[in-house]
Protein backbone atom coordinates (compact mmCIF):
# COMPACT_ATOMS: atom_id res chain seq x y z
CA UNK A 1 0.00 0.00 0.00
CA UNK A 2 1.06 3.60 -0.51
CA UNK A 3 0.33 6.96 1.11
CA UNK A 4 1.56 10.35 -0.13
CA UNK A 5 1.85 13.61 1.73
CA UNK A 6 3.94 15.99 3.79
CA UNK A 7 5.82 15.00 6.97
CA UNK A 8 4.20 16.95 9.82
CA UNK A 9 5.83 15.18 12.80
CA UNK A 10 9.07 13.32 13.45
CA UNK A 11 8.76 11.50 16.76
CA UNK A 12 11.70 10.54 19.01
CA UNK A 13 13.62 7.33 18.35
CA UNK A 14 12.70 4.39 20.62
CA UNK A 15 15.21 1.65 21.32
CA UNK A 16 15.72 -1.35 23.52
CA UNK A 17 16.93 -4.91 23.72
CA UNK A 18 14.93 -7.98 22.64
CA UNK A 19 14.36 -11.03 24.85
CA UNK A 20 17.32 -12.77 23.19
CA UNK A 21 19.61 -9.77 23.74
CA UNK A 22 19.55 -8.11 20.30
CA UNK A 23 19.35 -4.31 20.21
CA UNK A 24 16.46 -2.73 18.27
CA UNK A 25 15.48 0.78 17.18
CA UNK A 26 12.25 2.25 15.76
CA UNK A 27 11.16 5.79 14.82
CA UNK A 28 7.65 7.04 14.06
CA UNK A 29 6.58 9.76 11.61
CA UNK A 30 3.27 11.42 10.78
CA UNK A 31 2.39 12.27 7.16
CA UNK A 32 -0.59 14.43 6.11
CA UNK A 33 -2.12 13.97 2.66
CA UNK A 34 -2.52 16.89 0.24
CA UNK A 35 -6.23 16.35 -0.39
CA UNK A 36 -9.15 18.74 0.03
CA UNK A 37 -9.92 16.94 3.31
CA UNK A 38 -6.44 15.88 4.49
CA UNK A 39 -5.87 12.55 6.19
CA UNK A 40 -3.02 11.75 8.54
CA UNK A 41 -1.07 8.52 8.89
CA UNK A 42 1.44 7.58 11.58
CA UNK A 43 3.96 4.99 10.40
CA UNK A 44 7.20 3.59 11.75
CA UNK A 45 10.59 2.69 10.36
CA UNK A 46 12.23 -0.27 12.10
CA UNK A 47 15.99 -0.69 12.38
CA UNK A 48 18.83 1.78 12.67
CA UNK A 49 19.98 1.03 9.12
CA UNK A 50 16.54 1.85 7.61
CA UNK A 51 16.14 4.98 9.75
CA UNK A 52 19.49 6.26 8.41
CA UNK A 53 18.77 5.10 4.84
CA UNK A 54 15.38 6.86 4.62
CA UNK A 55 16.66 9.97 6.49
CA UNK A 56 13.14 11.45 6.75
CA UNK A 57 12.98 15.17 7.59
CA UNK A 58 10.17 17.43 8.78
CA UNK A 59 8.28 19.11 5.91
CA UNK A 60 9.37 16.69 3.16
CA UNK A 61 6.89 15.49 0.53
CA UNK A 62 6.97 11.67 0.49
CA UNK A 63 5.30 8.60 -0.93
CA UNK A 64 5.49 5.86 1.68
CA UNK A 65 5.07 2.19 0.76
CA UNK A 66 4.02 0.22 3.83
CA UNK A 67 2.60 -3.00 5.27
CA UNK A 68 -0.07 -3.22 7.97
CA UNK A 69 0.06 -5.81 10.73
CA UNK A 70 -1.70 -6.28 14.08
CA UNK A 71 -0.42 -7.82 17.28
CA UNK A 72 -1.86 -8.63 20.68
CA UNK A 73 -0.37 -7.49 23.98
CA UNK A 74 -2.01 -8.11 27.35
CA UNK A 75 -5.41 -8.77 25.79
CA UNK A 76 -5.41 -5.66 23.57
CA UNK A 77 -4.74 -5.44 19.84
CA UNK A 78 -2.50 -2.84 18.20
CA UNK A 79 -1.95 -2.00 14.53
CA UNK A 80 1.48 -1.45 13.10
CA UNK A 81 2.07 0.49 9.89
CA UNK A 82 5.66 -0.26 8.88
CA UNK A 83 7.34 1.54 5.96
CA UNK A 84 9.46 -0.57 3.62
CA UNK A 85 10.11 2.07 0.94
CA UNK A 86 10.16 5.88 0.96
CA UNK A 87 10.28 8.05 -2.17
CA UNK A 88 10.89 11.80 -2.15
CA UNK A 89 8.58 14.19 -4.02
CA UNK A 90 5.08 12.82 -3.48
CA UNK A 91 2.56 13.19 -6.28
CA UNK A 92 0.18 16.00 -5.45
CA UNK A 93 -3.52 15.34 -6.06
CA UNK A 94 -4.97 17.74 -8.60
CA UNK A 95 -1.65 18.32 -10.33
CA UNK A 96 -1.42 16.66 -13.74
CA UNK A 97 1.49 14.39 -14.45
CA UNK A 98 3.68 15.42 -17.39
CA UNK A 99 2.93 13.52 -20.59
CA UNK A 100 5.37 10.76 -21.52
CA UNK A 101 8.03 11.64 -24.06
CA UNK A 102 7.14 10.43 -27.58
CA UNK A 103 9.11 7.40 -28.72
CA UNK A 104 8.75 8.08 -32.45
CA UNK A 105 7.30 10.79 -34.67
CA UNK A 106 3.57 10.45 -35.46
CA UNK A 107 2.48 9.52 -38.99
CA UNK A 108 1.42 13.05 -39.92
CA UNK A 109 4.97 14.33 -39.31
CA UNK A 110 6.72 11.76 -41.50
CA UNK A 111 7.20 14.24 -44.36
CA UNK A 112 3.93 13.54 -46.19
CA UNK A 113 3.64 16.48 -48.59
CA UNK A 114 0.41 15.19 -50.13
CA UNK A 115 -2.00 17.99 -49.18
CA UNK A 116 -5.35 16.46 -50.10
CA UNK A 117 -7.60 18.52 -47.85
CA UNK A 118 -10.97 19.34 -49.50
CA UNK A 119 -10.87 23.07 -48.56
Image (cartoon, rainbow, N blue to C red):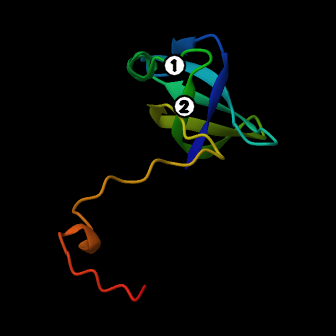
**On residue 62, which mark appears?**
2
Estimate the x, y position of residue 16 in percent, counting from the top left: 54, 12
Q: In which quarter of the image is residue 15?
A: top right
Estimate the x, y position of residue 70 in percent, counting from the top left: 65, 44
Q: Which of 7 and 15 is in front in this view?
A: 7
Estimate the x, y position of residue 66 in percent, counting from the top left: 53, 42
Left or right: 73 in relation to 91: right
Q: Nearer the viewer, residue 101 or 80?
A: 101
Mark 2, other Cα within 10 Å: few <14 / some 14–19 / many ≥20:
many
Residue drawn at x 51%, y 19% is 56
| Marks 2 and 1, how far apart at CA | 9 Å
Q: Extreme front residue here?
A: 119
Q: In which quarter of the image is residue 29?
A: top right
Which residue does the numbered mark 1 point to in the structure image? 56
Left or right: 117 in relation to 89: left
**Secondary element at image label 2:** strand
Left or right: 24 in relation to 75: left
Q: Which of 93 and 79 is in front in this view?
A: 93
85 versus 22 height, above or below: below
**Mark 2 vs 1, N-terminal side:** 1
CB contact under 8 Å: marks 2 and 1: yes
Q: Which of 72 and 92 is in front in this view?
A: 92
**On residue 66, which mark appears?**
none
Residue drawn at x 25%, y 67% is 109
Estimate the x, y position of residue 24 in percent, counting from the top left: 48, 18
Mark 1, other Cα within 10 Å: few <14 / some 14–19 / many ≥20:
some
Q: Quadrant of residue 11?
A: top right
**Secondary element at image label 1:** loop
Q: Extreme right residue here?
A: 37
Amino acid sequence: MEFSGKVIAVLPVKSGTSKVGNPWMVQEYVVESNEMYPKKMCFDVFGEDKIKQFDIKMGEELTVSFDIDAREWQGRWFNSIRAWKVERGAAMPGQPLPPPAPTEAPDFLQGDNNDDLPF
